[in-house]
Image (cartoon, rainbow, N blue to C red):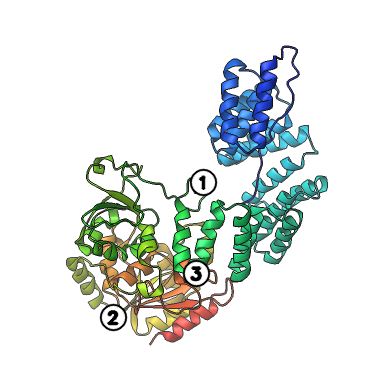
Amino acid sequence: MSKKKYAFSNAKHSSINTRKSLVKLNAKITQLYQKGKIQESLILSQQALKQFPNDLTLLKNAGAFSGILGQIELAKQYTLKSLEINPYDANLHSNLALIFQQKEQPNEAERHYKEALSINSSNSQTYNNFATFLTEQKRFNEAKKYYQKALNISPNNATIYHNLAIFFQKQGQFNKSKEYYQKALNIDPNYTEAHNGFGVLLQKEKKFDKAKEHYQMALKVNPNYIETKWNLSLLNLTLIKFGEGFELYESRYHPSKRGRGLMKTISPNVSTPQYQGENIRDKHILVCLEQGIGDTVMFASVLLELVDSGAKITLACNTRLIDLFNRSFDFLTAIPKDKDNRYQDLDNKIDYWMFIGSLPKFYRNDIKDFGKHKHYLKVDNVLLHKWQDRFNNLEHNTNIGISWAGGATAENKRDRSLTLEKILPILTKASQSANIINLQYGDRQQEINNFKRQTGITIHDWEDADPLKDLDNFTSQIKALDLVISIDNSTVHFAGALGVKTYVMLPFNQDWRWAEDRDDSYWYPNVMQLFRQNEDGKWDDVIQNVANTLE
């Protein structure tokens, strides 16, 4: 993450009406800030503002402290009031630009960055912040110019080198990125963010030992640095070190991670305690969905171990999964997930709660713990027969489902997704002896029609088959297939949990759940075959290998 800073004011109050108490207050606030006690600094500033509501130093710092603490609307209010008093303060414009940047108002952010630089053209921090903003906007040429201006003013500033490392990493210039991470660490060997970022980059290159070294150095400096704990958990899980991996995986719901696009896991609003491995025989536990549909299906396999512990289970999940889960797991009650995670009506009925993604921490600490439960999802037989009848009316006896796009983030989508044209060798081979069935979610009719006009290959599609609308219908459709071919998305989790033979095409930087150097899945044993990129972004060998595997 690019590092941006709010400008803090420690200027002495020079008004003719300065009171000794105000001077003392500002001095105390400065001391608290310098000790890293930001919350206390803000509280004291707010208390002082009741007595001195128009003191510029108090207002500026209250705005800066609010911004640091992520209280963006409050930061905006204090900063705007400060600007009313002094509209020509460059630091205030820079802080307000950062606030608008965090509020995703890019036009306002850019206006205030430029205003700040027109007032003071020698502030490297403003240049640095503006450059990170431009990087986020993918205006790379402009960003590079402002980073260089920042370095011209502050050539030994580790933060600028760190942000440049991220700048080059976003553009796929990994060697250049590593060079700048190293420059940042040469200036500041204890720079936790740089160690963390360097570790992420090395992990992408599959230099796992070196990545782990940087993660460990970051945690040596700051044992509570959540970003690194999270990244180290994914590294351990990729290397099938489940004990360490799932323990650190708990960092995903740490409050500091909220709003950063890494996880949106929020604890339920109940008075009962979170489950931490207690004896739960004859106890009632609320299991909460937290991640995507595919993750939920994958982690649901561990519910079978939880019920073996003698617990009564209520599962709060996506409404599209309720009928499927109630049918598949007759030992639990699936209820709709509350959008605000409020389950007070269950307070008097449950003894514990837990996230579904925490189940493996208690039941899957070794590779031998996987594979105990196979084909655990059960479809609606009426819907299954509907799909079987549909497929029986097609040309071939074999039916192959395909899915080619997906990903929760822009980076995921770029790394994982393909096009119908790209997988033409697979579709050409498959169409010779099988019916090709569309499993791709969303409206893809135009894309499918265009592909048929260009290639003559038919991909069968039905309007009632969209998993975004009906998962019971979708799972029945998958169950009626002989084979699923897909990139890494939720489709493969449904296919694996249904026991349908599946070929998964994986990017070079595959997700942790597919481990490293395996051609099978320990989550879905005996039904999945994994086809991996040998080089980042290169799909040709993967596609040809899948095509060659088809009978």
Q: Nearer the viewer, residue 85 or 518?
A: 518
Q: Is residue 82 left or right of residue 543?
A: right
Of circles 1 and 2, the one toward us is 1
| Mark 3: few/some/many CA within 10 Å (<14, 14-19, 20+) | many
| Residue 77 to residue 477: above or below | above
Which comes sooner in the sequence, label 1 or label 2? Answer: 1
| Mark 2: few/some/many CA within 10 Å (<14, 14-19, 20+) | few
Say if mark 3 contacts mark 1, CB within 8 Å. no
Q: Nearer the viewer, residue 447 or 257?
A: 257
Q: Nearer the viewer, residue 329 or 166?
A: 329
Say if mark 3 contacts mark 2, CB within 8 Å. no
In the image, which disc is placed on residue 101? none
What residue is disc 1 on? Answer: 256
Which comes sooner in the sequence, label 3 or label 1? Answer: 3
Q: Residue at x 23, y 67 (%)?
A: 378
| Residue 360 to residue 9: above or below | below
Query: How many numbered circles does the render carry?
Result: 3
Q: Is residue 219 left or right of residue 164?
A: left
Q: Nearer the viewer, residue 41 or 74?
A: 41
Label 3, secondary structure: give it: helix
Residue 404 falls in image quadrant: bottom left
| Alpha carbon distance from label 3 to label 2 | 42 Å
Which comes sooner in the sequence, label 3 or label 2? Answer: 3
What residue is disc 2 on? Answer: 395
> Which residue type does callout 2 highlight?
Glu
Return the x and y of residue 385 as percentages of the image width and height. 19, 71
Of circles 3 and 2, the one toward us is 3
> Which residue type does callout 3 highlight?
Thr
What residue is disc 3 on? Answer: 238
